[in-house]
Amino acid sequence: MPEYKLVSKNYEFPDQRLLKAALYRGGYEQWKRVIKEKTSPQAIIDEVKTAKLRGQGGAGFPAGVKWGFVPKDSPKPKYLCVNADEGEPGTFKDRTILEKDPHLLLEGIAIACYAVGIHTAFIYMRGEFYEPQAIVQQAIDDAKKEGLLGKNILGSGFDLDVIIHMGAGAYICGEETALLNSLEGLKGWPRLKPPFPAVIGAFACPTVVNNVETISCVPHIMRMGGEAFQQVGTEKDGGTKLFAVSGFVEKPGVYEMPLGTSLKELIYDVCGGVKDGKQLKGVIPGGSSSPILKPDEIDVPLEFEAMAEAGTMLGSGAVIVLDETVSIPQIFMVMSRFYAHESCGQCTPCREGCTWIYKISEKILAGDGKPEDLDTILSLAPMMNGTTVCPLGAAMAIPVMAMVEKYRDDFLALMKN
């Protein structure tokens, strides 16, 4: 199956980041139509629901449903926070939107804000994204000058400010409530839920938090219609998804595929298979938080429910391909080191569990490990799942358990030698 380009359809044009080029290729047409026709905000929300657009940052929550949770009669201001804090290892698809087609994102922001009654939108951007920040800020400035953002947009009386807020490199701030705390100038610790951000979010006001790719799908939904967008994907997962494919594969990169495409098809037909004709060792299908799949498990549809049934998750769509030369214990150590470093320390199971698993992984790689260490990991990891304020503990626990259970012999081989 070939790529189905919606979000990425203008990536091939180097000038697409410029407003003039974006307008030439149809940019902001749907936003202008919404303003001109005075489209009902509820009609937009219903269209997004019909499209079966799900959150593309990892959780997969239906976007239209999330918008509908925002109270319509709240006297408080409402906010949109676009999560551009792309820190998941292996994930780089949102960055391509920011760099290659920032006006698509801004058009999606404008339509989403109009639909929910929002007049201030924040783009919370990863602290290391210096170049994307400059590109998006220029796009915001140009759109304001053209009257597409700012005060009294296109004479409609609708106002919208879009503000970039840079993070400081903390992975935990990709979690929506930690993001909101960071945005407010507080320590980037996740909050207990409920209350959910749609009711009490940024500055204790109703807030929608959506991923960059999720928002960038909105103009295409308005152009195609929700039903047509849904039919590109599956019955429950509408449209396409950007997959960031990396590792030992012939053609790494960002590929946009209809949801429901087979993972095996993506790797072998679209990306050219494993590099240099070597044997496949395993695939991490949705970023470092998703459990690894063995070669005989990859013929699975890339959709949320099917991946869950396969014992893993679609996650952020970061597909990491590992060949026969890769040391799974080494990958295990690198992953556990990352989570031990990025745990915010708020919850004891995550703080202590991540650190201890990392220490055990170092011990195994140094040749000092014992078979009992693997049993310790398998007894420790479940205590981190579902016992913390946010999912970071589980994001480490579940993948490391999968590695130990599926590749136990690889760990034991290090102990013998």
Image (tube, rainbow, N blue to C red):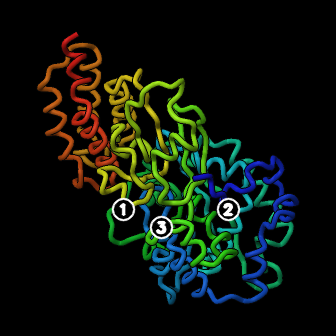
10 Å crowding of disc 1: few (<14), some (14-19), many (20+): some
Give me the C-alpha separation between circle 1 and circle 2. 27 Å
Where on the picture, by quarter, is residue 7? bottom right
Say whether residue 32 is left or right of residue 403.
right
In this rendered view, identify the residue nearer to me: 171 or 290: 290
Residue in the image at 23% along x and 47% along y: 384
Where on the picture, by quarter, is residue 224? bottom right
Q: Is residue 317 above or below residue 113?
A: above
What residue is disc 3 on? 234
10 Å crowding of disc 3: few (<14), some (14-19), many (20+): some
Disc 1, disc 2: CB below 8 Å? Answer: no
Identify residue type, mark 2: Leu
Q: Is residue 368 above or below residue 273?
A: above
Residue in the image at 71% along x and 56% along y: 9
Say whether residue 270 is left or right of residue 410.
right
Identify residue type, mark 3: Thr
Q: Give the number of the mark in front: 3 or 2.
A: 3
What residue is disc 2 on? 105
What residue is disc 1 on? 305
Disc 3, disc 2: CB below 8 Å? Answer: no
Residue in the image at 71% along x and 68% along y: 107
In this rendered view, identify the residue nearer to me: 80 or 303: 303
| Residue 24: x %, y % from top left | 87, 63
Give me the C-alpha separation between circle 3 and circle 2. 24 Å
